[in-house]
Amino acid sequence: MDIVLSDTGLSDAGLSDAGLSAPLVPPAPKIHPRPLGGSPLGDLRIAWEMGRNLIGAWAEDDFENLVTPYRFMGQPGLVVSDPAGVRQVLASPNFRRSVKLGRPLKPLVGDGLLLTEGEIWRRQRKSLAPVFTPAAIGGLVPHFVAAGADLVQRLEGHDRANLSEAFHHAALDAVLRALFSRRADREGATLAAIARRYLEGPAHFRLLDFVARGVDDLSFADGDRRRLGKQWLAAVDALIAERRAAPHPEGRDLLDRLLAARDEDGAPLPDQEIRDQCSSMLAAGFETTSRLLFWAAYLLALDPATQGRVRAEIQAFPAERVNSLDDLKAWPLLRSVLFETLRLYPAAPALGRQALADDTVLGHPIPAGGTITISPWLIHRHRKLWDAPTAFRPERFADQAHPWGIEAFIPFGAGPRVCIGAGFALAEAQIVLASLLARFQIAIGDERPVLPKASITLGPDHEPDFLLAPIVQARP
């Protein structure tokens, strides 16, 4: 019998005559029967729910409606789930990133590509583009293979493990190797500790974040953010200073490429910009990838049949043989599993845009200053956009030449600001997860459902132990 998970617990699902089980339905937070806003008290309820869990305020109608006008804290806005409207907003220069969504991250990433706007963002994006070409990412593959091998070595001899914690370490190890040619020890361990404390506390939205008009407003309440952010930036500065003091004779990592990068006038990037770009890559790269790895492992642990098929694919082409991005084509099912995981558990569950001037979206007028709310969590589970939207079906992506062609699939955003590191993250995730599955069969150590809890990223409400059963390697 396969296990099908509902919102409230576990139930058995019988196998069909063909030997196929019903699709896995992973658990999700309860959906409110009615919208919570519409009054001062309702707005406070929304802010409270979203402070606890950024995806905690959605109502049943939100998974049916493609456009919903609203007022929140006195400001007009639209929830847009229609793919055409989403792409209009994300491609238009009239809509900038909402300052409210940037407040929790600013102390950690500074003025890097993640939060900048306008001409500064355009210049930074252009100067960083050569760093993230497929050829450049392909050159980082050995770093990902080494991080995957280190993960397996750390788990050897254990029959239980907190894979959420293990993936945090492995993803940080991968990005530190790729960015600084360093392992996740000493300075890496310091960065990991700071990031974990920040993301588990100060990164959560607060009532004042919803009230603030600017990213630096009401900073008197952000002492913990500033304190941890200062420690984080100082640790990144130390790694960059060490490289400047002992440069590599030839480029081998992302920092080398940043130090060699030039802006449109041929000048090297300013020291603070290099620091802020490194901080953005570290914070965004390791946190989002570790979450993707956790949710993929969780789904595969609940679906042993699919896990077995993925393992067979990996055993036919082991991770240690991967030398280029082209080699990853040997794992089409693993790739589909990761895309389906990103659909069900998008790393960034909410995007906000603010209108610079009066505009119209799908026939709805938006005044200057109005907000557009775009939720990948909502869109990826929308009942009018997906067949069986809450079911785990990796085969959705099996015949897609390029999944970004699916309009309702936006795990990395869309338009000019689509995540520049998407290729990096996907290559890293495939190699690290393949390394784990080739060595261990994984299962969940208890029956308590893991519910998603979102702040800046979408993580678990608790970190379950996974059972690890070593895979017997066939003799040649």
Image (cartoon, rainbow, N blue to C red):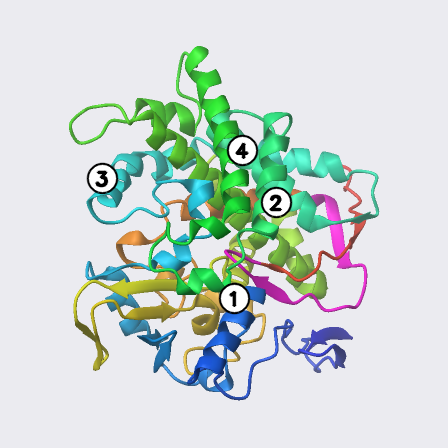
- The residue that mark 1 highlights is 54
Q: Per the image, is 439 magenta?
A: yes
Mark 2 or mark 4, earlier in chain? 2
Query: Disc 3 versus disc 2: distance between alpha carbons?
Result: 31 Å
Q: Nearer the viewer, residue 351 or 106?
A: 106
Q: Amino acid at mark 3?
A: Arg
Q: Residues within 10 Å of mark 4 (few under 14, many from 20)?
A: some
Position of the C terminus by quadrant: top right
Q: Are marks 1 and 3 in contact (CB under 8 Å)?
A: no
- On the image, the x and y values in percent for residue 372 come to 32, 70
Q: Nearer the viewer, residue 254 or 334?
A: 254
Badge 4 marks a residue whose secondary structure is: helix
At x 42%, y 64%, the residue is: 210
Position of the N terminus by quadrant: bottom right
Badge 3 marks a residue whose secondary structure is: helix
Q: Residues within 10 Å of mark 1 (few under 14, many from 20)?
A: many
Mark 1 or mark 3, earlier in chain? 1
- The residue that mark 4 highlights is 231
Q: Are marks 2 and 1 in contact (CB under 8 Å)?
A: no
Badge 1 marks a residue whose secondary structure is: loop
Q: Nearer the viewer, residue 205 or 284?
A: 205
Marking on residue 123: 3
